[in-house]
Each structure stands twice: as C-alpha cells, then as structure tokens.
Image (spheres, coloured by chain):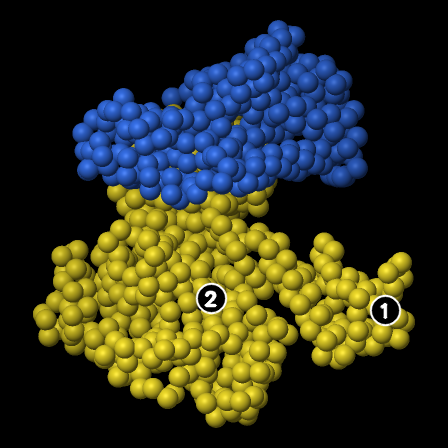
Amino acid sequence: MEFFHKVTKYPFMHTRKVWYGVSGVAIIASIVLLFVHGLNLGIDFTGGVVLEFAYPKAANIERTRTALQEAGFHEAQVQNFGDERSVAVRLLPTDGQDVNQVSKAVTDALKKTDPEVELRRAEVVGPQVGEELTNQGGLAILFTFVLIGIYTWWRFQWKMGVSAIIATLHDPLIILGFFAVSDIPFDLAVLAAILAVIGYSLNDTVVVFDRVRENFHSMRKASPEEVMDASINQTLSRTIITSGATLLVVVVLLIEGGETLRGFSWALTIGILVGTYSSIYVAGALALDMKLSALDLIEQKKDTSELDALP
Amino acid sequence: MYQFAKWKYWLIIIVMVVGTLFALPNVFGEGPALQLSRNDRAAMDQASKDKVLGLLNADSVPVEASYTEKDRLVLRFADTETQSKARETIAKRGNGEFLVALSSASRAPDWMRAVGLKPMSLGLDLRGGVHFVYEVDTVGAVDQAVDRMERDARATLRDKRVPYASVTRVNDSIRVTLRSQDDLTAAQDALRSPDGSILLNTSDSAAGPTIEMTMTPAEVKRRQDVAVQQNITTLRNRVDELGISEPIVTRQAVNRIVVQLPGVQDPNEAIRVLGATATLEFRLVDETNNPYEAAQTKRVPIGSKLLNTRDGRPILVKRDIIATGEQLSDASSGFAEGSPQVNVVLDSRGGQSMMEATRDNVGKRMAVVYIEKKQLAEGERCEGTRNGALCTEEEVISDATIQSVLSDRFRITGLQATEARELALLLRSGALAAPQTIVEQRSVGPSLGQDNIDRGIRAMAIGLLLTFAFMAVYYRAFGWIANLVLLSNLILTVGLLSMLQASLSLPGIAAVVFHMGIAVDANILIYERIREELRNGNSPLQSINVGFEKAFATIADSNVTTLIAGVVLFAFGTGTIRSFAIVMTLGIITSLFTSVVGSRALVHAIWGTRRKLDHLSI
C-alpha cells in the first residue's frame, strides 16, 4: 500500500503567512489561557495529598464528600478516578500539618462510610519538594532547548538552528495551552512527556532540514522557496507515516494506560500532532524568512569536505 | 554491488543472543517466596540453611527453590498457601532465630540465577510498596554543633584557668571576650583545636580583646554529611527491623534520604517504626541488690530502676544519670591491640560529670541505657512505659566494668567486633541523629500495582499488534522486516533493562510503548528513501543501497535530538520519571543498532544476494 504514489507538490511555503497567523493566534491563546486560567497542577508541583480509594461497589461521591466534611476536611476535592469504583481525594497542603496523620484520618473517615473501602494509593508531597520539582522541571526544559539548539546550530547552520528551536518552542506552549483549557491534571509525567515531545518534534524538523541541505546542493537553480517546498514534499510521506505510526501507539496508551497515564498520553498525542505541523509549516517557513539561501549551506560544506566537488 | 561485511552478521548474532539471554528471565514470572535473615544479623550460612530446610521438610512443606542472596535465604514456593504454611512453621519452630519477610522471587531456572541473569526490577508503582523522602535538618545539626562548641569553650577556659569576661554565641560563631592581652594568648592556646576544624579570629572591642570561634566551611560540610550519613545508617537499621525484602535506603541530593519499601501496604506502620526517636543515658549499675529477685518480686529498691539488657537479662541501674546522649559528641568502633572497642567522646560537661562519677567507682559497672520513643499503633503492645499513644522503651545496650577514672574520652572494651559496631551505631543513633521530616511519601497498594502491570502489558501488546499490522500492510515484505527489527529492538531493550537492573515504572512501560512508534521511524525513513529511488527509475538493488546510505545520516541526526531530551530527563528526573528517561535513552540506542545494522543485514540477506531482481515487495 502506498498513500503517496508520486511526490506531492503542495506549495507549503506560499501560504506560510496564513500559518504564521494560525500559530501566532494559538500561541497567544495558550499564553493567555496559562495566565488567566492556569494549569491544574498536580501535587507533584503544589504539594499536598492525593489518596485513591477503591470501593467494593460503585462509589458514592456525595457520601464520601459528606464523610470528609464531617471529619473536618472542608477543602477536600473528591472525584471519580478512572472507573466508578475508584475515588481520588485531594487535599492541599496546610502549614504545620502532619501530612501522614492526614492520610490516616481520611482513611478512617471513609472507613465509616464503608468498612471495605481500600486505600489503593497515597501520595504526599511536601510544599518544599513541589517547589523544587517545579524549578527542576523548568531547568530541564531550558537545558533541553539549549543543548538541542547547540546541536542543530553545529550540525546545520545558525538560521536553521534558530528556526528549529522556535518551531520546537511552539509545541510545548500549545500543549500547555491544551492543559490549561482541558483542566487535565499536569503532573511530573506530563512534564516528561513534554520533554519527549521536544525531542520528537525536533526529530521531524531535522529530517526536513537534512533534505533541505541536500536539495540546496542538487537544485542549484531553484529559489530557496522552491527548495523548501520540494524538501517538505519529499519528506512528507515519511513525516505523515511516522506520525501516524507513533500516534497509533500513543492513542493505545490513552485508551489502555489508565488514569495515571492519562495526562501523559494526552501530552504525547497533542505533541505529535502539533510537532508534525510545526515541522512542516513553522520550521521551514522561519528559515526561509530568515533568508536562508544556498550560500549559507554550500559554503559550510566546502569547509568540511573536499569530496563534494567530485562528480 | 554493495558488499555487506561478514563480521556485521556475526556482531548482530552475538548481540541478539546476549540480549535474548538477558531478557529471558522475564518470561518465567514470579512465585511467592520468603526471605529469611538471621536474628543476630550474621550471614545466612549453610548450617542455618540446612536447619530451615530441615524444619520445612519435617512439616512436609514443599520448597520449590532455595538459595542465599545477600546474606539472606530465599525460599520459593508453588503457591501462597504453601508460603504461609512455611512462614508458620518457621515462626513456630525456628526459636526466634530468623526474621521472615514475605516476598516474591523469580521462577527462572537455577542456572540463570547462578550466572547472574535476573528479571527486570519493578518499581514501586508496579509491585506495590511505600516510598518516602526524608529531609534531614542539616542546619539543626550544625546548630547543635555550635552549641556544643560554646559549652566546650567555657569548660576549656575554666579547666585551663583562663579568666574570661564572657562567652556568647553570635549566629554560627562563638565570641569569647577576655580581660587582658595575656589572657588572650592563653585562651588562644587553650581553644585551638588539634585538627584545625575551628578558626580563631582575634580582634579588639570596647569590652576587651575578643576571639571569634568559627567552624571552617569544610567542618560545617563534614558535620552535615555526618548527620545525613548517621540518619541513613539509623534508618537502614530500622528498616532491617521491619523485615522487608529488598529495601532501599539511599541519599538523594545533599540532605535528602529516600527509603523504598516494596511490598509494605501500610505506610503508617512503616513511618512509625522508622520515625522512632532515641536517646541515651549513662548510669551506674546497682550491684548491691539482686536484679533477678527484683524482677521476680516486682519490688525495685529505692534509688534504682529495673531494666532489661538486649539479651533479656534483668539489670538494676541507679536513678542518677551520669551523662545523656545530648552530651555525646562522637562514638566510633575500632580495634586496639587486636580487640574490638567503642571509642566514646563526650562534650566537656559530660566529661566533667563522667569524671566525677567514675572517680569513686572504679571497678564497678556502668550501664548505657538506650531509650526509644515511638507512636503506638492501635492495639499494639508497648514493651516499656506507656503514656497515651506514646511508648517509651528502655533497654541496657552495654554494661561494662569501669577500669579507671574516665573523662570526656573513653572506650568500651570486651565486645565482639559486630557488637562493637552495633553499639557505636546505637550510641550515635541515640545521640547524634539530626531531626528529619518526611517531605514526600508515595504508596501504592499491591492490587493497584498489579493493575498497572496488566494495563502496561495490554497497552504494549495492542500497540505492538497495531504497528505490526500497519507496517505489514503498508510496506509488505519490507514491513515484516521492520516488524522483526521492532521485535528484536524490544527484546534488546528488555535485555538491557534486566542487565542494568534499572527499576521499571509505569511511565517506563509507557516509554516502551511510545518508543515503538519512534523505533519504526528509522525503517520508515529508509523505506521511503528506497521507494523514492525506485520512482526515480533506479534498479531495485541500487535503490536499496542508496536508500540505506542516504537515510543513515538523517536517522543519526534525528535520533540525537531525542537522545538529548532523554539524557536531560535522566539528569533532572527522579523516581518514576527517571525510568521513563532510561527506557527512552536505551530504546534509541537499541533502535539505532537494530534498524540501521540489523535491518540492513536482513534486507541484504534476502535481496542483496540475488543475481537478478526486478521487483521489490515494498
């Protein structure tokens, strides 16, 4: 089977201004959402207590809530977790409270509603740890960008490096926007997924840029815009097929991975979609508008290899 | 025609055989097991092993496998029923010689274990258990040290008869104000520490010449390190008390300690045992009365206290306390003239009262009392005195004859090497422990752990099948090569994970699934190139060669970026996230190998050797 019998000839670059607009709006919307609505940060970052209980039968959320109210946990958030038998109880950290006593007290309170309730998971994160994880997470993302930037700069050329980084920056921002809008809890696993997406999205861009470099050599008479279009079209089948194959398994994770991996799988799903788009429309377009030309690449090639001059 | 070097085939075969071998133990699964260690903490020897097996044999409890691992005896059983029966037998007939922990053990055949092949180690979110992070108050530890420094300065000046105006604490340093320049020189000589761990700065103030005593930064760091190390050792000891198989107690960052207890279901129970606080008291032994009599009649002489030694012997100690753990500065075990001993260092106040107490009591015995305070769980019995939910247990950990007048430095002799080590540890844990708090706690019940495993495996299986189907339909024969390559990639990843014994968490499994998509990417790149070359009118063989050649650079470039993300994630991540990073990184390495070298070898073996090839199934 083959979806792309012939090399496609879509004039991607021609419409790039439109896509700049689309991306710009998406990014601004994401940033606004992040500030206005914010992320539903998990306790990994805020600190606090999450307890997961399983009832023998379908859980009665209302009763659970009342039981907790009676026990003095007025700010407890109670919701279904995954299936109808499971509930998650979340408490925000309060100063000077012995977190371990809390988990016991909550368990005792729920045992009163149903003695057979089972504590399946307890996570208690102190506020100082949360703060540290947030800082470390930010640092990790920053480091990834710096290292990847250095690599693409060194491997290609600075205009391509900068466009690749901007295109890649675009993806986590939109993922964050998605998390702000959907209210899916943002935990450490989501952060890990975002880092994976950064690597993945760049992977796509690199494939396109590799072809751009190659084509600047072989298509000497073509304009930079034509070279860019040709490169994207030539790699299009690979880009689509790989994204499709990856999306396939990630959707499996989304469906089968359970509640714990939900945020993580969503981040990957959105990341793959956006990453594919940004490699096609954003990275190449930016390089083009930074006046990337054959000279930028051919000069560099001559420095490193003499063999290219041979037929 | 492109020549494919023979040695590459051999390389692939060797790598695959080794990888498969390492991955193999995972196929057998796990069975219920017991882990036994000796109550006296000695290593499990052949005699003990024979004894245990003899006991079980006498009760006709069938044992599937038995072997020693890290000083522990592991017994594997066919089912949980036999497991609990065996546990009962050992509890009933073992005379308390053994500590028994429930666990599970791999069902892999003996020879695999013998050559060191083990299944992947599963993280707590998969096998169930408790994970704690303690934060040691290193500031508090240094604070205590500064306090001690202040007391010592006063006592030293008094001892050496150097008059002083005042000794005060200013932040983390001690300011000694003197009356004259002569006193200043004398004080400097007296206060100078032999190891140079304290800096002395002199200056003049309105009140008179002053000396500023400050710990060197190296000393401060050492104090903090010692505090964390000490708490780790104490935690390890307490964890051993819980009798858990494969506990982990490690240091994280500067002042954190991670404790992982697989299989523990109730975190509160563990917190209680781990969180017990201990102190020490040095007291004289009451030798005029008979402790056995006192124990029997329950009548304790006035001015004495009835306690027990570690081995259960009753002992009477005087009510007056000579020194407490607060006055202990250091305790270490060592050897002098070939026999083990514990070296104890007290601060000056403790040294002073130790001297006064021992001056008149040479030849008599002195006891070291270890006091542990812990929160009681519901229905739990307190071995000592009970005050509400708080239980105080006192125990004499050493009673030795006073050989001469003691001062701030003395030693306790007449011990076995292990006893000396343990006494030093107990002394330190009763005195030097810096305050610590739990800053993170995660626990996963065993049923959720199993759920996570089942989910992970199902997601992996479905993902694999879908990918297989997709590749086979889209690339036909070449698709099957990609599938074979993907499968070997999975085997190699599992093999590497088993070899490195890096713990696998649920995000780790997710990384395996996600990675399947990325792993086929290399092959997709190659195949798309080959198709492109075919479209350009090249011959099939030529297309294969050019396709592989041109795709290689792209594959390398594009994988480096994902690799960078993986390495950064590994460096910054902890716990379950680290597992994700490990799988991601290993996966990239294995997929580079399998798709570039492996896939090419397969393609070459199938099509490369044909003399005539007009059509490719791609």
Q: From what the image shows, is residue B365 above or below residue A217?
A: below
- Label 2 marks which chain's residue? B
- Residue at numbered disc 2: B279
- Give the total number of marks visible in the rendering: 2
Q: Amino acid at mark 1?
A: Arg
Q: Dot 1 surroundings within 10 Å: few (below 14), some, or many (20 or more)?
A: some
Q: From what the image shows, is residue B162 above or below residue A156?
A: below
Colour chain B is painted in: yellow
Callouts 2 and 1 in the same chain:
yes
Report x, y in % for residue B417.
45, 83
Q: Is residue B228 left or right of residue B93?
A: right
Task: Give the residue drawn at x 33%, y 42%.
Answer: A104
- Residue B468 appears in the figure: no
Task: Tell me the SS state at disc 1.
Answer: loop
- Residue at numbered disc 1: B179
Q: From what the image shows, is residue B241 above or below residue B40?
A: above
Colour chain A is painted in: blue
